[in-house]
Image: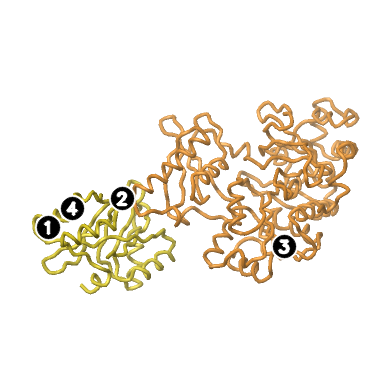
Amino acid sequence: MFVKQISVFLENKPGKLSQVTDILEKNDIDISAISIADTTEFGILRMIVNKPEEAVAAIKAEKFPVSTTEVLAVEVADKPGGLNLALQTLNEAGVSIEYLYSFIKRNGKRALILFRVEDPEKAVEVLQSAGIKLYTTEEINSL
Amino acid sequence: MQWNKVRECMSRDQLRSYQFEKLKETIDRVYHNVESYRQKMQERGIIPEDINSLEDLKLLPFTTKQDLRDNYPYNMFAVPLEEIIRIHASSGTTGKPTVVGYTRRDIANWAELIARCLTMGGGKRESVVQISYGYGLFTGGLGFHYGAEKLGAVVVPTSGGNTRRQVMLMKDLKTEILACTPSYALCIAETLEEMGIKHEELNLKAGIFGAEPWSDNMRKELESKLGLKALDIYGLSEVIGPGVACECMEQQGLHIFEDFFIPEIIDPITEEPLPEGERGELVITTIDKEGLPVIRYKTRDITSISYEHCPCGRTHARIEKLLGRTDDMLIIRGVNVFPSQIESALMIAGDAEPHYLIIVDRKDNLDSMEVLVEVSEKLFADEVRKLEEVRRKIISSIYTTLGINVNVKLVEPHTIERTEGKSKRVIDKRKL
């Protein structure tokens, strides 16, 4: 029920991000979601890609610190209140969110949001019992 | 095991009378053969006959690197140039290099010293010894080379650089003893990881690392990554080169070879001798050197001395692992800081690699210190919060060690320059 996310440590300097996208292009890797958390000195680039293992190996080979994290790909209705339903559900269950960002791709009228939560197992349980769909890596790749 | 048991384990009384005899000879020689020593002694109203005991050594004037510069290149040599068979020179980062000369006997003595050091590391005739110190004007490479040959070891003179090839040879030739700078040893350890070679696949038994100060924590790291016993060797070209002192397997200080050198510890400011155990500047007098004898040479290295009995059986005094140099010492807001202390603080903070760079600056008349630390794979976390926590931990560890607050900046791996010789740890931008 989890999707593999890649995180890369980047110094806050011009050209750093494009070095990583360049590696991905050379390895023919497709990005389906991307976000950057930044501080004044460094940033953490987070991505969902179609070939995570290959991406990790290629980025590692260029000496960037990289790690993988399991995140939830949550389907929400693309209308007012769509995201709120998912957030309310997590809130009621007392699951706090570390961060979230959205997918580039959509599934028809539905949007996809990536969640990194403190208690992933519990989040899966409460979201599914509220009838909210979670995507697997395969499902995302086939969109 | 000692290379020269008679000399290395002689009783303190015997040693002292031997030292006195050799000291007399040396003073006599420099007084008559080296103009600048004679002048300095005359200024103090001292003649060689005034030296009647080892304690009288302190009547003699100090020698500094500046004296060697002022007498560049040959004027401090105590023998005619035809007796000299080798020249080495120190890296002259400021102005002219320091040129040192060796007679045939000096080269043989130096080889004796290195053979003792290699024996301390368990070296034998059948040991494969890889010398990854630079060969050339730097004393490291050739100094070790002659000593390893004297030992009768299987000498592999790889010099520095081309690390992947070094590693390949190390594995294939079954190197047992590695001699290089500690920072290059770390570079070799990283290359092993990159090449996917485990240290269990190698035959390394001991590393003899020197030419720059390094911490006990770095020792632990090198020992676990390379699977060897890491020993510290000390030396400086003005005195002879590497082999002035070396650690035995006890790793409780470096035995200074007192049948060749008389050590003293002085207060670097007042120049007064300090008692056993107190830290100060190491001063060395050579008592068995022909080409370039030095009298009370101020090494600028900070250490302490111990005459306590060592379980290894050697009677020669031990100096504490070098803490830093009087000229590496940074004074930040009035606090004395040695780069090696930052290194220890990083290791204590956890998984930080000892790759760091200290940048000192002065803003609005206040010293500021920033430490760049590389983020290793182990250190990296997906969350900003956790990385900030790592940073805070390093800051607090440095605060605990030095009592000053510094800024710590996390940088990508391999962005701090790696050197294959001595490493640059400090950039001081202050304009005073």
Q: Are marks 4 and 1 on the same chain?
A: yes
Secondary structure category for the residue under label 4: helix
Q: Which residue is mark 2?
A: A38
Amino acid at circle 1: Gly
Is B169 above or below relative to B298? below
Could you tell me residue B285's position as x and y percent? 79, 38
Q: Say the numbered circle drawn on residue B129.
A: 3
Q: How is the image coloured?
A: by chain
Is the same chain shared between marks 3 and 4?
no
Residue at the (20%, 72%) spot, across then down: A143
Q: CA distance from mark 3 to mark 4?
A: 65 Å
Q: Which-is-in-front pick, marks 3 and 4?
A: 4
Please say if the residues under marks 3 and 4 sit with CB atoms less than 8 Å apart.
no
- Inter-mark Cα distance, 2 to 1: 27 Å
Q: Give the CA distance from mark 2 to mark 3.
A: 49 Å
Circle 4 residue: A87
